Amino acid sequence: MSQTPLLSLRNLRTMFTGENGEVVAVDNVSFDVNAGEIVGVVGESGSGKSVTALSIMGLLPKTGARISGGEILFRGRDLLKLSSREMRGLRGREIGMIFQEPMSSLNPVFPIGDQIVETIIAHERIGHRAASARAADLLNRVGISSPARRMLDYPHQLSGGMRQRVMIAIALACSPKLLLADEPTTALDVTIQAQLLDLLRDIQDETGMAIVLITHNMGVIAECADRVVVMYAGRVAEEAPVDRIFDAPNHPYTVGLLGSTPDITRDERRLWTIPGSLPRIEAPPSGCRFAPRCQLAIADCERGQPQAVQIGAAHWAACLRTQDASSLGRKT
Amino acid sequence: MTQPLLTVKNLSKSFAARGAASAKDSRTIYAVDDVGFHVEHGETLGLVGESGCGKSTTGRLIMRLIEPSEGSVQFEGQDVLSLKGTDLKRLRKAMQIVFQDPFSSLNPRMSVEDIIIEPLVVQGDMNGTDMRRRARQLLDKVGLSSAHAGRYPHEFSGGQRQRVGIARALAPNPKFIVCDEAVSALDVSVQAQVINLLQDLQEEFGLSYLFISHDLSVVRHISTRVAVMYLGKIVEIADKKTLYASPRHPYTQALLASIPVPHPSLRRQRARIGGEVASALAPPSGCRFSQRCPMAEDLCRREAPAMRHLAASHEVACHFAERSGTRAASPKARAVG
Ligand SMILES: Nc1ncnc2c1ncn2[C@@H]1O[C@H](COP(=O)(O)OP(=O)(O)OP(=O)(O)O)[C@@H](O)[C@H]1O
Ligand SMILES: Nc1ncnc2c1ncn2[C@@H]1O[C@H](COP(=O)(O)OP(=O)(O)OP(=O)(O)O)[C@@H](O)[C@H]1O
Ligand code: SF4
Ligand SMILES: [Mg+2]
Ligand SMILES: [Mg+2]
């Protein structure tokens, strides 16, 4: 693809100050998001998915967190160089975001209709009446029936699935170019998750908006993503088009992640497992972060961060032994 | 045929609704309503369904952690609900439970060894040295090391804590373990380890499990048979293969159609059910699924369907189970991209 990406992370590094000095939560992360595509970011807890999203949005905690390196280019502009006023103008209008727990981002003391209307008015020169009408349209669009009546409801009167629909409506209010969705369905039942993933895909089809879909669930990736970024312990392990991730993973961690997930279409007596557990951020392994759990690790793996190797078109893996990884015995 | 290990009949439990504004407003939640099933020796019965459908309440009732409003539970031919004194103690040895949250289900002020032997201390028929030896054996058994015995829960990762919870459940040599979302809070790579461990232990000790989960892929992997719950009722039970390949209850079909695909080449436009689960406070009359069911007719809104056999190992509670075919079973493949 020769077009300039809509969003481009370049060597992003985000740190937190803890009791015993600074820890690196996001380490040298780079990936692109093109207009109109769904990029899935997948990884286990603590891999840095949310911190990456918050870094993009400029929503890191005011104290104790800092971006110590890299660039976040959105339509060619480095967001890290914008003033907080400029970032406020961009948030909601050009980049929307939805979180795992909608309750924490909805204001409990205002009816949901007001909250959508406020968002629209904050970003556009538009009358209250027109904003109200748009809000009702949006609720309708995200599958909420009798929107005029629903607008008067307070967040606690809605189910989790409904609240997430409202969050999507708010995120869509100003037709952003990019939507960051951080585990938007994780807290919900499967039938509701399926409804919402369908909704996100439909909206994406219709509006051409790009979506960064953050999840720990390989199934959600299989359902929705065009391209995939696999994160492990603050770094990108592998990046590839979705079918390549599933058919030809080249990082041992991706292989293990796929093998650990029970597959509804096949009978396996035992699951493939990755030994050990996730590293602690305070004491990251030297060299390749996956080395202590990796079946293929050799002495060199502990020496430095493995560089991303290009495997094929739009396919990279940060591993010294990509060739052997692709033959690791998964799903046997 | 020998008797099943566990037989549950007509089990019901209602609660007074929490947060009722006044005593007058005291409404009732029928959390578990006329539920029946059995668990064979050495098998895993999966129990699936969406949040609030009554899975945990069912597990707690069987364990007698809460008392039912109605019904019977037979374990090895004994009536669990009427047991008292030493008989109840013996039962408590034979049935154990592992909970979801490895962070809150372990006492933070007790060492791992003390946590594991706690159920043995309560039993009171082993001396201290034997109990400690047993704790160390169990730590090895669940893939931790006996060197961990003196450590405290906060020194362990989530997966390790869940192993401690499993070791505690194994301590009194149970025959039956309720696993209530026992792997749900774990990261996938660690979840797979714990699933394999549960299966190994089952083989070694001939354990039976009631495996409660909302994750249909995990349940398919681990179960022998599977029961599906909706709003306090079991709507379908079958051997795993039948349930996943030819589900007959429209709710089971909808649930299966909602599972994310395992591979992008299987993406499909699926028949989704709309709406959300009705409130347990005001369940619809007739079939509890009737409001969301694509096949519902007047009969469904009038009369609750009884559980009935379609085949020896396949029971379903739907008036039109014969008609429902296997709509969800064959996904139409759709090209990626
Ligand atoms: N406000 C904070 N202060 C200190 N450390 C933090 C803070 N927020 C996140 N971290 C740390 O940064 C690392 C990355 O966290 P992040 O929330 O991005 O993980 P994640 O991939 O989103 O995980 P999950 O799947 O659990 O949501 C973790 O080790 C986390 O403990
Ligand atoms: N002690 C209680 N008092 C009042 N209501 C209760 C109590 N325990 C459970 N309930 C209600 O009973 C119903 C069934 O709850 P239960 O916890 O068994 O569901 P579940 O299937 O385990 O759900 P989840 O998947 O969320 O764990 C719910 O409506 C719940 O709110
Ligand atoms: S770089 Fe080495 S340790 Fe890291 S994933 Fe590759 S083989 Fe394993
Ligand atoms: Mg997160
Ligand atoms: Mg429960």
Image (cartoon, helix red, strand yellow):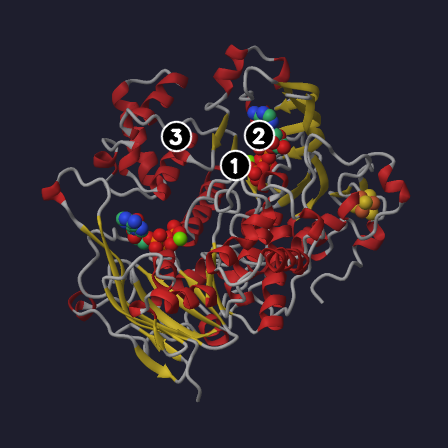
Above or below residue B2? Residue B14 is above
The crowding category of the residue bearing disc 3, from other C-alpha atoms within 10 Å (few below 14, some 14 to 19, many at least 20), is many
Is ligand 4 less than 8 Å from the beta carbon at label 1?
yes
Residue B143 x/y as whole percent? 68, 56
Between B337 and B112, which is closer to the camera in this rendering? Answer: B112
Query: The residue marked by circle 1 belongs to what chain?
Result: A
Q: Is residue A28 left or right of residue A35?
A: right
Between A113 and A279, which is closer to the camera in this rendering? Answer: A279
Q: Secondary structure at mark 2?
A: helix
The crowding category of the residue bearing disc 1, from other C-alpha atoms within 10 Å (few below 14, some 14 to 19, many at least 20), is many
Is disc 2 in the same subunit as disc 1? yes
- Residue at the spot of label 2: A53
Above or below residue B237? Residue B264 is above
Q: Is residue A259 left or right of residue B226?
A: right
Q: Secondary structure at mark 1?
A: strand
Above or below residue B185? Residue A11 is above
- Asked where in the image residue A301 lies, by quadrant, the reply is top right
Give, as a three-letter code, the residue at label 1. Answer: Asp
- Residue at the spot of label 1: A182
The crowding category of the residue bearing disc 2, from other C-alpha atoms within 10 Å (few below 14, some 14 to 19, many at least 20), is some
**Ligand 4 shown in quarter:** top right
Residue B221 x/y as whole percent? 56, 66
Query: The residue marked by circle 3 belongs to what chain?
Result: A
Report the Cα–Cα distance between label 3 and label 1. 15 Å
Give, as a three-letter code, the residue at label 3. Answer: Ile
Is ligand 1 less than 8 Å from the beta carbon at label 2?
yes
Give, as a three-letter code, the residue at label 2. Answer: Ala
Q: Is residue B318 left or right of residue A8?
A: left
Asked if disc 2 and disc 1 are in contact, CB closer than 8 Å, the reply is: yes
| Label located before the other in sequence (2 or 3) | 2
| Label located before the other in sequence (2 or 1) | 2
- Residue at the spot of label 3: A170
